[in-house]
Amino acid sequence: MSQILLKALYETLYMVLGSTFFSVILGFIPAIVMTLTASDGLRPNKKIYAILDFLVNTFRSFPFVILMCLVTPLTRFIVGTTIQKTAALVPLTIGAIPFVARVIESSLREVDHGLIEAAKSFGASDFQIMLRVYLKEALPSIVSGIILVMISLIGYSAIAGTMGAGGLGDIAIRYGYQSYSDEYMFVTSIILIIIVQIIQTTGNYFYKKLS
């Protein structure tokens, strides 16, 4: 059991950390554009904001199981297969991008407009305001939001595991549910709870430090 669970734990962490990394990088782009083009942004543009807002809301509404099926051709094109942990990074990342984008946009738009106006009065450019005011002030909130995304991805990775990606979800189904082994169900559940607690505690620590 220990060897099986250690391998599954590695696969779960690989999927969660990998998809978090890629979704944060890709989610930053629409988040910044939406912040800039919002009605109270530095460069208001109703059309661009409306399009991005619609896309983010649309992809957020897809159940992850359906999303995995929809992106199967893209997953096969990028990775060459639709099973195993690396292939799961594609749907996990695509599923997390709209959540990351919304979290970052909400954090950026919560920044005090007085600070932004003060930066403008000193002649700061849009890039300087975004980097030194928006991102600096919103960083604790962004970190807190990303932690919540990571915790959600743990659940998504368990779903992906039931569809051939491996990980703790796969172990819980194959060894626990299908083989009627309560021990595997219990241990995998405990491991997932521990992972969530570690991630949340770490996130709280960095949130306090950044605040």
Image (cartoon, rainbow, N blue to C red):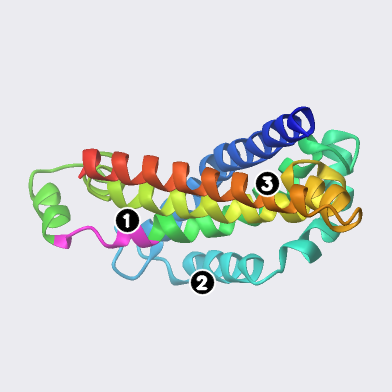
The answer to whether residue 58 is above or below residue 153 is below
Q: What kind of element bears circle 1?
A: helix
Query: Residue 105: where, in percent of width, then height?
Result: 40, 58
Do tag 1 and tag 3 residues touch (Cβ < 8 Å)?
Answer: no
Do tag 2 and tag 3 residues touch (Cβ < 8 Å)?
Answer: no
| Residue at 45%, 41% in the rendered image | 198
Q: Which residue is mark 2?
A: 50
Does the magenta run of residues contain 96?
A: no
Image quarter of residue 85: top right
| Residue at 75%, 56% in the rendered image | 159
Q: Alpha-carbon distance for marks 1 and 3?
A: 40 Å
Query: Residue 34: where, in percent of width, then height?
Result: 44, 60
Taking the image as drawn, is residue 127 in sight? no
Mark 2 or mark 3, whichever is nearer to me? 3
Q: Which residue is mark 1?
A: 108
Q: Is residue 108 left or right of residue 190?
A: left
**Residue numbers of the magenta segment:** 106-113
Disc with the residue nearer the chain's start (2 vs 3)? 2
Mark 1 or mark 2, whichever is nearer to me? 1
Disc with the residue nearer the chain's start (1 vs 2)? 2
Image quarter of residue 2: top right
